[in-house]
Each structure stands twice: as structure tokens, then as C-alpha cells.
Amino acid sequence: MVERVVIVGGSHAAVAVADDLRKHGFGGSITLLSEETTLPYQRPPLSKAYMSGEMSLERLKLRPEDWYRDQKIDAHLSTRVIGIDRQAKEVVTEDDARFGYDALVLATGAHARPLPAEIGGRLGNVHTMRDLPDADALMAKMADGKRLIVIGGGYIGLEAAAEASKKGMAVTVVEAAPRILQRVACRETADAFRALHEGHGVSVLENTQIARIAGNADGAAAAVELDDGTSLPCDLVVVGIGIVPNAALAEGAGLDVAVGISIDDRARTSDPAIFACGDCAIFPFNHMPTRLESVQNAHDQAGIVAANIMGHDKAYDPHPWFWSDQYDMKLQIAGFNRGYDRVVVRPGKREGSVSHFYFAGETFLAVDCLNDAATYAMSRKILADGKALTPDMVADETFDLRAFAK
């Protein structure tokens, strides 16, 4: 009988678990323990609408303060959990407080991967972009005429580059891989975003390794030095080289940990009383261990956690989606492109819109929709319904995708 649920983390997944438990009629205690000083907030808009000034902090918050009171959710901020006593079924905080649980949820998220200190990763104006303090610190330093170096050409780095360019900064993106977005997108999508950034004056250096970040007398970054001897002067550096799941708490408790906290398709860890969800968790998807960094995964996986705490025995079968906003380009992604061997390009109905469809053989895996919301909506439905969309269908511009989706 579950009467006490403790949720560790202030993430989207953490709030979604609490919300879904109450929607399922759970009447027991829910305690949420977050290290952050601010009530849980949306993270994707940090490098988009929040940094551009289009979204306020209040709008950023996932729920207002009175929601926690009305839902009887005991939220503790500035509270770091340092241990799990699995025998006593208690979590232990840094100030030695103990919270007992019948079911424990680890929604600890992830942190930005830093550059090593020995090559300048800890200099004063070297920043990552992951949480609210990161966004606030960058907003305070981004100013017209200043020079920004972005290390890493993934979506977070490119979004930060776009916002900085819009603020009048001189921006250079340095990517170690042969092209930007290499890990997450096809060449066609990467080409479109490279052209977009270069059209806004951003310099994109691909297949380029950094040697170190050189500091000045004040301990701030003065230049990014490349391995070919080139020195790029800078006023600010943003590092966007991926994230690291926050799995140390689980590992310290003896739970199975891989590249994240290992869970089954019911979101249970190797301890049946402990669940995990969101960016911190790795789970079986299409017969492979998978970690999905998305709002969709955080929200939907949290729903599975809540349902299974309530005894419903539900399996997680995700239908992934993602998005990125840069300048006037809205990228919407449906599906998961892992294992693709072919990309079919299909123009959208609106001028300038296009979609890139990923296939493994004849199997439709995913699509990148660039300013093509209609194709995105249709593709999500096709993927969710499991319909057999083929490369030949997509390549035929006369093929009625809307009718097929219906």
C-alpha cells in the first residue's frame, strides 16, 4: 500500500508525476525535493523565448505557488538529497533531514557537460546553458558588439548563437565533428541551419578542434585557441557539448546505472520501490537502451510512473517529438531517427517550408519539419497510428499526405 511518495528533482518530470498522481486519485502524501531555489520551471524555453525576453519567469514556471498548496504537494526548495537508505525507505538530505517513502521517484534530470578545467573550462565568463541561473547569467552579459564563441554545434549551442546574434553580438560556432547537428540530424537539416546562421552573420567552423581557452589577468576568457594555432578573441564563451544524467544518487544507492539510471518499461529501477523518469533515465525503446532528452519523454514517462505507483501496470511506448526555435525558423521533429539509412526531402505547402523524412529501408522513422507545421502534425499521426508510409510516397509531391494521415 503506497501512502507516501517522495520525488527527488525539480524537473518537468517531477511535477508531472505529482500532477498525475493526484489526477489518479492518490490521496497520500507527496513530497518534492528540489536543489533549486525557484519552483520548477520549463527548461526548453530558457535558450529560446526566455532568453529573448518574450517569456517572463512567472510564465516559465510549470505551476504557480498556490498549485502546490491546493494539490497538497509538500515542495522543499534548496534541498539537496545526498543519499537513499533503501532498507529504511528514506532519503537523506545534505542537512541530515530524512523523508520516508513507500515509493520513491528519481526525476533528477541532467547537467551540462563542462569543458575540463585544465583547458579553461572554469574561467569566469565561460558558461553552459542548462538551467535558470545559466540563462540569467548569459542574458546579463549578452550585449551589442561583444564577441561570443559557442563551443558545440548542437541545438542548445545553435539556439544560444541565434539569441546572441539577435542581440547584435559577433558570434562564432566551433564544432569538432565534420558538421553541426551530426549526432541528432541529417545533413539536409544541418545544411539548412548552417545557411540560416551564416545568413545572420554567424561564423560556423566545422571539423574544428579547440586546444584551450586562454584567460586574462582577471581570470576571464580572452580567446579560444584552436589546435591549428588560430586564436579567436572573445568576450563570452558558451559551451554546448551535451549533458550528463544526474545518476550519482542512484549509483550511490546501489541501483543499476548505465548512461543514466536504468529502468524497465514500467519505469522501475532495479529496486521495485524506486522509479525514475526524464533526462536521468535510460530505458528500453525499440529493443535498445535509450535516453530521450525531451519534454515529451519527461511528461509521458512521468505518467507511466504515476500509473504504476497506483498499481495499473502500464508499459511505456513513447512517440517522441522535439522542437527548436532559431531566428524565424521553427524546427519540429516527430519520431526518433536512430538507424536511418535514407532521407527523403519533401517541400511544404508554404513558401520556404520543407520536411526531411528519415527511413530505415522502407520503414518510416522520423521527420524534421522546417517551418512546416502541417506536415509535422500529419507525420505525428502517421507515426502514432503505425501506418506504412514509404519513401516513394513521400518523394511523390502529388501524394496526398493529409488524406493518408486521416
Image (spheres, rainbow, N blue to C red):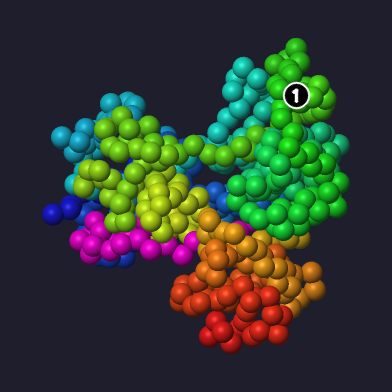
Q: Which residue does the image show at 52% across and 69% down from the upper left?
A: 363
Residue at label 1? 227
Q: Residue at x 70, y 68 (%)?
A: 345
Question: Residue 310's x, y, as percent?
Answer: 22, 60
Q: Which residues are magenta?
A: 301-327
* In the displayed structure image, the side of residue 380 where residue 82 appears, left or right: left
Q: Is residue 138 left or right of residue 274?
A: right
Q: Indicate the quadrant containing the N terminus: top left, top right, bottom left or bottom right.
A: bottom left
* Quarter of the figure with residue 84: top left
- Is 150 one of the magenta-colored residues? no
Residue 316 in magenta?
Answer: yes
Q: Nearer the viewer, residue 248 or 132?
A: 248
Q: Position of residue 76 (x, y in %)?
A: 36, 40
Q: Nearer the viewer, residue 355 or 218?
A: 355
Q: Quadrant of residue 269?
A: top left
Residue 324 is left or right of residue 28, and the answer is: right
